[in-house]
Image: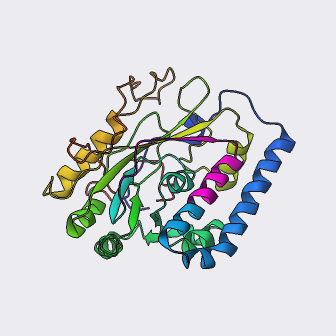
Amino acid sequence: MSVWLPTSPCTPEACAGHEGDSASLPHAVLRLAAAVALIVLGILGAPPVRLLPAGPRHRVVRAWSTALVRAFGIRITVHGSPGPGGGRLLVANHISWLDIPLVAAALPCRMLAKSDIRAWPVLGRLASRAGTLFIERDRIRALPATVETITGALLAGDRVTVFPEGSTWCGRAQGTFRRAAFQSALDAQVPVQPLRLTYLRCDGNPAGAPAFVGDDPLTASLWRIARARGVRAEVRLLPRIPPGRYAHRRDLAAAAQRAVVGTCTRPTDPNPLPGIPAQPATPSATDKDSANRPAASVHHWVSSSPAAASSLRTPS
């Protein structure tokens, strides 16, 4: 393990428990079967779908991604406007492998993911066919080439999603946004759009079941999500940060992170992560897509300072 890799203190034991009703065993099995069927369908259908014009292709991707998240019994709510098309760097907080289909359900895009995902059974093949960009997280020397690849995709008019925390957090606390990915937005002179992802229980507090943190095995995460009931996911598309507003990636990353962290509407969590104070509710961000509003910070995946211990289990 490289000391330069970003980490989080979140663990499955402390963060991924589900407080609420559970689905019956047959119901959970049916959910998993439906999800597997959709993934296989996605693998088989990816080549012809990629040949479709952008409009129909995006509609198909959104419908498939929505169906996959819904197969696990999770309802989706999207706030805000996606705005016009064109190249754009999307940056979001990172909680789970579910973040990937959740973002795609709101705004079809290319994802940046760790190279390990290519070796995942079934899901790795699907990610590759979906046009995912991969990063070797433990090779800092490969970072400039990754930034260049993202820049090329943005210049080609693609929307690229990165999770700049570089590691998954449980949702009751957040990591610092790393800066490197923001350089690609500066080089390509495209907007940065912050996204806030939240998984909630029926009572409005953060749901633990979707969290994919620490050394949590993928199979355990799949089963835990399939068993949980009453979970809903929210995607908040925040005002874009227009090109030229910030000259340095450090300032751009900080602005994006402020937007993501500071606009989440939820009650204070009564059970905060050990060692991290509870975060009070804050006013919600406007749903209006306006390039004139100052936007807060979003950040990238490789730190320029040594990271502490724990979670490296992240699809991005």
The residue sitting at 15% across, 53% down in the picture is 246
Q: Is residue 315 left or right of residue 75?
A: left
User: Within the image, what quadrant is residue 175 found in?
Assistant: top left
Q: How many marks?
A: 0
Q: Where is residue 238 drawn, in percent x and y?
A: 35, 43
Where residue 119 sits, quadrant-wise, is: bottom right
Instruction: Say above or below: 311 vs 233.
Output: below
Residue 137 seen:
yes
| Magenta-tinted stretch | 62-84
Residue 117: x %, y % from top left = 55, 67
Q: Quadrant of residue 260?
A: top left
Q: Nearer the viewer, residue 38 or 163?
A: 38
Residue 227 lies, in percent from the top left, at 74, 40
Residue 308 position within the rendered picture, expressed as x and y whole percent measured from the top left: 37, 47
Query: If the image is split into quadrants, where does the N terminus sit?
Result: bottom left
- Nearest the viewer among 265 and 115 is 265
Q: Any magenta on residue 63? A: yes
Whether residue 220 is visible here, answered yes or no, is no
Coloring scheme of the render?
rainbow
For image coordinates 62% across by 74% down, the residue present is 46
* Magenta-drawn stretch contains 300: no
Q: Which residue of the protein is positioned furthest toward the left in this rendering?
A: 247
Q: Residue at x 52, y 64 (%)?
A: 58
